[in-house]
Image (cartoon, rainbow, N blue to C red):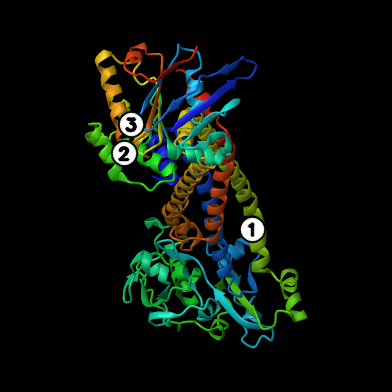
Amino acid sequence: MSVLKLAWKNIVSNPLNLILSIILFGLGIGLISFLMLLNTQLSENFEKNLADIDLVIGAKGSPLQMILCSMYHIDNPTGNIKVDEAKAFLNPGHPLLEISVPLSLGDSYKRHRIVGTNDGILELYNAQLDQGKIWAQDLDVTIGAGVARATGLKIGDSFKSSHGFDDDADLAHDHSAFNVVGILKPSGSVVDQLILTNPSTVWAVHDHTAEDHEGHDHRHHTPPVRSNEELLQHPEKDITSLLIKYKDKTNYRTLSLPRAINEHTDMQAASPPYEINKLYSLIGVGTDAIRWLAILIAFVSAISIFISLYKSMKERKYELSLIRVMGGSRATLFMLIVIEGIILSFIGFVVGMIISHGGMEIMSKFLQASYRYDFTGWRVISGDAWLFVGSITLGIVAALIPAYQASYTDIHKALSEKN
Amino acid sequence: MINTENLSFQYDNEELMSFPDVNCDAGEIMLVLGQSGVGKTTLLHLLSGIIRAKGGSVSIAGQNLSELSDKKLDHFRGQYIGVIFQKFHFIKSLNVLENLTIAQKLAGKPIDENRCKELLENLQIGHKINSKINELSQGEIQRVAIARALVNNPAVILADEPTSALDDSNCQAVLDLLSTQAKQSGAALVIVTHDTRLKDMIDNKITIS
């Protein structure tokens, strides 16, 4: 029967007294931890998907929308641009560009976007083939690992797409099915959530549904378009945007390229890190407010731990005196109350971890749908360790005054009181 | 085993209280009689070192209590003195056995569950070993209190009004129980009470007035 065990028995013998402070404490810790977990995974998501992309070119509109659409696939396009307008940037011989990847967007399957592009996108995101092959013919698709997992599509399967991001049967395109020819390895980037195909596939699906109505042979008579050179053969066609990687970021001509595009063309160019930082600062205000709220809750709950310890200390005055009579010292009483504070805050911390990690795991499905990224609750971040240290410290601090009072209980008075 | 000399105590702004000397050897019983409010509890707390004397001295097993620091005194009390309180204070969150083992632990002695069980068996409450204190009858609680006072083989057992709430037959039984246990463990037993029934049963006595 050590002091630790006695402290534990004292807590479990009267749990109702302490349940409120534990729940309050757990809620505060849980909120802070959840925010950190969300923040960590969100910024990892954003950073991983920056993927060395230096510039995005697309139709004029909101640059942030264009970035969110073309790089994170969580927004709609700002519009389309003609291949003709972008031909300079599709030219493999462009002196400033190392990689230039066109994107044609429009359809999706079960909320996974179908992207008409070429295999430059695999290079940008370091994605590798797991099974099957890279798309080649029109209506061939290679799908990301996340798509395969979520939809259960396998090589050889076929499916029909729907327009935009909506998973609505009424909007389903009535055309020949896409054929899965390959599946990518998980890369942790947005490519995991994409269905990749030729730009010409996207054109075909769209042009036909827009122009034709009844029973039409959707097989294409033109050869499939994949590479930028092939794309340049169709100047009248639309693409949504271009992802660009520079040869040399510090070249002065490179630096003036975005401005030149914005001023002299009907297209716009935007720098992903710049737009994302802008987004961070917007989100930051909200998460800061919630974080302060959580800190406030944790602080209030520390006060409630203080009050419950103080109250139970007063109620147990004669027990504490008894401990002295039986040979315990003032230090023993002090330690007893401090250990009770530590146990309370530890339980609160565990409750908080369950709230945040369990909550994240439950919410991960919703988050994945809106952010196109795998979230998980089963992950410990360094912030949790700091929260642990903070929780225990708070528990000790809350226990200090009751512990001091306990150690200076007048045992003569406590034991002679008649009641 | 326990001896006092010219013991006195004074509460703030009150008269000085002087106490007759207490002398009780190992295996013997001493009775301290006095009406309510004459300072019996004060004397008991002086004897157990819960409060320190204003004048005079208390020595137990040859150790003068006033020579010990607070921390050492707490430790000494745990090892040498067993107190049976009038109100039978226990730690409510612990069961009977745990209330005994924590007394061993706090006195700095090794935890010896067999010793505790033996004691409880002796006092005929061995079957209540895992009960909570508030599940016991008054008589059982008293026995647990006696067991706890004895568990560390103290040199001195101090009992505060052990019989005042009992009828005549139980009064005799408890006195017998206490004196037998004290003799068995070779402790000096000091009973502080206003219960005049005990007056004729114990020879060695003093009266506080």
Please tell me which residue lies in front, B188 or A300. B188
Q: Within 10 Å of the Cα at label 2, are there few (<14), some (14-19), or many (20+) other Cα atoms?
A: many
The amino acid on which the numbered mark 1 sits, given as a three-letter code, is Leu
Q: Residue at x 45, y 44 (%)?
A: A3
- The residue identified by callout 2 is B97
Given the image, what chain letter belongs to the residue carrying mark 1? A
- The residues bearing labels 3 and 2 have C-alpha atoms spaced at a distance of 20 Å
Measured as percent of width and height from the top left, residue A70 is found at 56, 67
Q: Quadrant of residue A62?
A: bottom right
How far across and down, in percent of the image, does residue B94 sit? 36, 36
Name the element at disc 3.
helix
Contact? badges 1 and 2 (CB < 8 Å)? no
The residue labelled by disc 1 is A279
Check the picture and name the quadrant holding the C terminus of chain A: top left
Residue at (65, 67) in percent of width and height: A273
State left or right for residue B96 relative to residue A111.
Answer: left
The residue that mark 3 highlights is B182
Residue A328 in sight in this render: no
Where is residue A64? Give x, y as percent: 63, 61
Q: Are marks 3 and 1 on the same chain?
A: no
Q: Could you tell which of marks 3 and 2 lies nearer the N-terminus? A: 2
